[in-house]
Image (cartoon, rainbow, N blue to C red):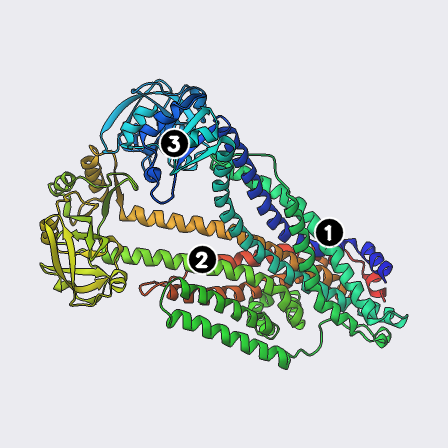
Amino acid sequence: MLKTTLAGLRAHKLRLLLTAVAITLGVGFIAGTFVLTDTVDKAFGQTFAKSAGKIDVAVLPGDGAGAEGADGIPRDVLEKVRAVPGVTDADGLVRGGAALVGKDGKAVGDMPTVALSVPSGNLLRYTVDEGRAPRGGGEVVVHTGLAEREGFEVGEAATVLDGRNRPHRFTVVGLVDFGIDQEASYRGAVGFDTATALRMTGEKAYGELDVLGADEAAVAAAVGGGYEVLTGEELGARLAEEAGADTEIIRTGLLLFGMVAMLVSALVIYNTFSILIAQRMREMALLRCVGATRRQVFGGVLTESVVVGFVGSLLGLAAGLGLGWGLLALVHRFDDAIPVAAPTLAVRTVVVGLAVGVVVTVASALLPARAATRVSPVTALRAELEPGSGRFRLGVVRTLLAVLFSGAGLAVGGYASLVMEKGETAMFAVAFGGAVFFAGVIAAMPALVRPLGRFAGALPARAGGVPGRLAVENARRAPRRTATTTIALTVGVGLMSLFAVVAASGKATSVAQIEEQFPVEFQVNTQFGGEDDRVPHALAGALRQRPEFAQVIELRDTMATVEGADLVVSTATASALGTTLKPNVTEGSLSALRPGTALVEEFTAEDAGLSVGDTARIATERGTVEVEVVGFHKTPAFGAYLVPEADFDRYFTERDPKAIMVKTADGTDPNAARKAIDAAAQPYPTVRVMSVAEFKDTLSDAVNSMLMVFGGLLGLAIVIALFGIANTLTLSVVERTRESALLRALGITKRQLRRMLSIEALVMAVIGALTGVVLGIAFGWAATEAMGESSVFALPYGQIAGFIALAAVAGVLAAVMPARRAAKASIVESLSTE
């Protein structure tokens, strides 16, 4: 039986290849993920080992109880290390924020550039691409990528703001690659000598001590307890491990999409083997006639699946190696902080790839193999019928499963979206309900094929003439086969539709909240993450003098101790509250916000056990005051406690706002208004001006970028599903050889025959796409409802229509090769085939 199976595989190499393609793509994605992340880990390890290998010992702040270095390493500890016998050099590393001012007079980036100490001599761990390390108080080095973007060159002057946003002039003496520091590469960085770095950042302690000479034990004894002392090799391993944590997250995310690809592959493999077994029914019966047992037939089919899985997995590993290397090159092109190394194909990747590929293939072939054992020997004597033809019935068991899973999925999804408390748990419950409901759709799909086929094929049947009508009937006459073929496409299109709906709804929700709560044209902030992230109060005064603006609103806040907890207390310009600014009040009333009262953020109130009418004690700069809670809100911009402006002025001395909102006067040209704000903000380098329209565009770009990523990853599942359609049509061409020849004999031309198969593929693709779109929209709505009370459902009509159109076009393309093969067949030879 083994020889018979292997001989059959050798005789049908094309069939073997087509069947293995789905596994090749799925395993290739998984293997490519491992190759990408393993190679990045390897490259980081090599980079960090090379960097840390330049030092002998490193001292890091400890995190034990009572550790002196809990907030850094005091300067006197460096002197102790320098006094250790054998130490030839030692220096402290400083890290903080210091914004580089661009040539336009504004601070570079949305966050302040990282400021680092860059030691010269043997302790220099960074790569100097041009120039040299800084040696004095008037010198600075700039991250190479940042310098290229902003146009800085060695020898030029540069302005850097210190921790208090005071400007200092430096001479650029070098361009440095801070590649081993991921944050510095992301935000951009400037480097100084150690003393200057301490002065510019305002840091009082070191973040690390690097030592040359002496040994680990001697340095540990000198610094005493509370510090962590590592060798250079141990430090390199530590840094590589921390970088590996990021790649682990990437690996997990990509593998989730790999699992989706393997699920689709399993559906394709199952359908392919089901068709193959049905086509070889007489062959199986003849084997039974000559003495083959049911076990041997079952084993023969499983052997074939093992061979297919193994071949597909080997090809997938090769494809994964190339895919991983290509992805790494692409990632490095967009982020040069990611180092490049030779592609790594670990033993684990080989084992996992082969195991997943073979197991998925064999598992997918189990049911078809079991069906093969039921073939009666007498079947070999019967006239051959087209597999899958005849009267179709869903069956009692399948009907019960469809009703059970669909009902359970709808119940869970409905409960999560309409009854459960909104949030992450509810969204996970919706996802679980969607998965269960999808299982019900798989069970019921054969019964849906004929009505969906009639709907999807209505236009092609009219436009395609006789070939079009024949194609629609061909797609509908074998419901099980069409259902199994299209359900794979349903998975990919459904997930893409789900992500599109959730993303569009999230964007619509954000825009609606902005328009409702902050109906202004401009917002003024500072760089995010700076030590002093306040907008100067003087800027608000200057803007109020301009005729272009009807209202200038200041949002102020400060940290205060409220009922023993450190919380944010905020306020806003009194004339704007309740008119321009409308906090989302969930209980109580904004009109009750009078002197001596406060609105409390609802989660803060819940944690503190507060109710409307209770009092809370706030520790202010002028003593403790009691305020009455008159309501709850859930507007993040207003912090934990929102108090009237007059009370805030009485409680605290903070005058500079966190943000300024500007409403233009009626009839003001938006461009003129923008120029007026930019001119007023020019003296303040860290101030950022953004229009609401720009914010919406930024939000839209972010959503579109996310959809591109998800679409690209889920696109693999769709490609696999389309290979399934092509595979089904190819096998169907073989199966319907005599039928096609008879149609040709009756007058159908080669072009009409090709059109018939193309329309058949089109109908199958549209059936799968329509089912996926309906499921994606339905559970996208449920997920949106589960997000929050104020979520806004939005349906991206253009994208949804695009998904259906793309699936239809791809389905037609999938039919090109099978259609050409059918048209090339000889009429006489096909009609004479027994």
**In this view, 485 is above or below 647:** below
- Secondary structure beneath label 2: helix
Q: Nearer the viewer, residue 828 or 594?
A: 594
Q: Where is residue 381 drawn, in percent x and y?
A: 87, 75
| Quarter holding residue 486 | bottom right
Residue under label 2: 500
Residue 816 visible, this angle = no
The residue that appears at 29% across and 48% down in the rendered structure is 693
**Upstream in sequence: badge 3 or badge 2:** 3
Dot 1 alpha-carbon crowd within 10 angstroms: few under 14, some 14 to 19, many 20 or more = many
- Residue located at (39% from left, 57% from top): 504
* Tag of residue 311: 1
How much space separates mark 1 and mark 2, taking CA atoms? 36 Å
Measuring 30% from the left and 25% from the top, which residue is drawn there?
196
Q: Which of the two marks, 3 or 1, is nearer to us in this view?
A: 3
Q: Position of residue 553 (x, y in %)?
A: 16, 49
Distance in Å between CA atoms under marks 3 and 2:
56 Å
Q: CA distance from mark 3 to mark 1?
A: 60 Å
Q: Which mark is residue 223?
A: 3
Q: What is the three-letter code of the residue carrying label 1?
A: Val
Rendered image: mark on residue 587: none
Dot 2 crowding, Cα within 10 Å, few <14, some 14–19, many 20+: many
Viewport quadrant of the C terminus: bottom right
Residue farthest to the right, as pictured: 290
